[in-house]
Image (cartoon, grey):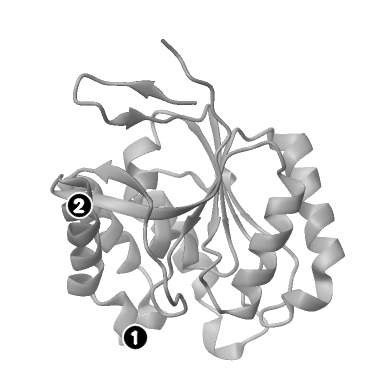
Amino acid sequence: MPSQRHNNNMNFFGKRTLFLGAHPDDIELGCGALIHNIAKKTDILCVTLSDNQRNPNLKNVKDEHIESMRILGVPQEKVLFGPFTTRIFQDSRQEILEYFLKLRRDFKPDLIFVHSKQDVHQDHNTMTEEALRAFRGITVLGFDVVRSSYGFFPHFLAEVTEEDADKKIEALAQYETYRNVYYFNSELTRSIMVRHGALAEVPFAEGFDILRIVGRFGE
């Protein structure tokens, strides 16, 4: 997986990159800038396990998610929704595992992003555990959703551009449903990317924890 640039930073890549989120908005909150950065460089598939349509207050979030992903450069045919019910993923562990195994067979990802293991939301935690089972032998990185992660610290930093950061903020602004929710605040979103950038000594970055790295040393 890795190679070296002249400044000793590691290049990482995936010809087929899979982003897994529990609910609409999770993937953008955790990875939006990175998705915009790589959308034209790799085959991306974004899969959200619950569309939240059983909640009458969240009827618009499915369409808001599709529009958000479009702004990040991901077409609608690359945005999938699973059949699972919010807040009770733990009751569907085997079904989630089998769903992920089918994704593995059909998409054949070589790089995967899912919720951090530091995330205490029951759905987030369950799907990360099942992803690690289903995608053994594949690199898996964990993203942070600020409202439900405790003790998260990014040990894998991915540089992004200011344009990527702006597009992430624009994408999240498509969620009219969450307009007044604190973790959608644009200043908070930008400050997180600036902080991760400071850790990487670049202007902007997104941060992940390392759930599994599968690599090969190249000369």
In terms of image quadrants, where is residue 86?
bottom right
Count of marks placed on residues: 2
Q: Is there any visible trace of residue 45 in the rendered image?
A: yes
10 Å neighbourhood of mark 1: few (<14), some, or many (≥20)? few
Looking at the image, residue 160 sits to the left or right of residue 86; the answer is: left
**Which residue in the protein does label 2 denote?**
197
Residue 107, given in percent of the width and then of the height, sits at 68, 35
Residue 81, given in percent of the width and then of the height, sits at 65, 60
**Location of residue 104 with respect to 144 vertically, above or below:** above
Q: Is there any visible trace of residue 51 in the rendered image?
A: no
Amino acid, disc 1: Val
Q: CA distance from mark 1 to mark 2?
A: 24 Å
Mark 1 or mark 2, which is nearer to you? 2
Amino acid, disc 2: Gly
Towards the viewer: 113 or 175: 113
Mark 1 or 2, nearer chain start: 1
Identity of the residue drawn at 32% across and 21% down: 4
Towards the viewer: 219 or 191: 219
Looking at the image, residue 23 sits to the left or right of residue 40; the answer is: right
Identity of the residue drawn at 41% across and 61% down: 30
Q: Which mark is residue 181?
A: 1
Q: Secondary structure at mark 1?
A: loop
Q: Which mark is residue 137?
A: none
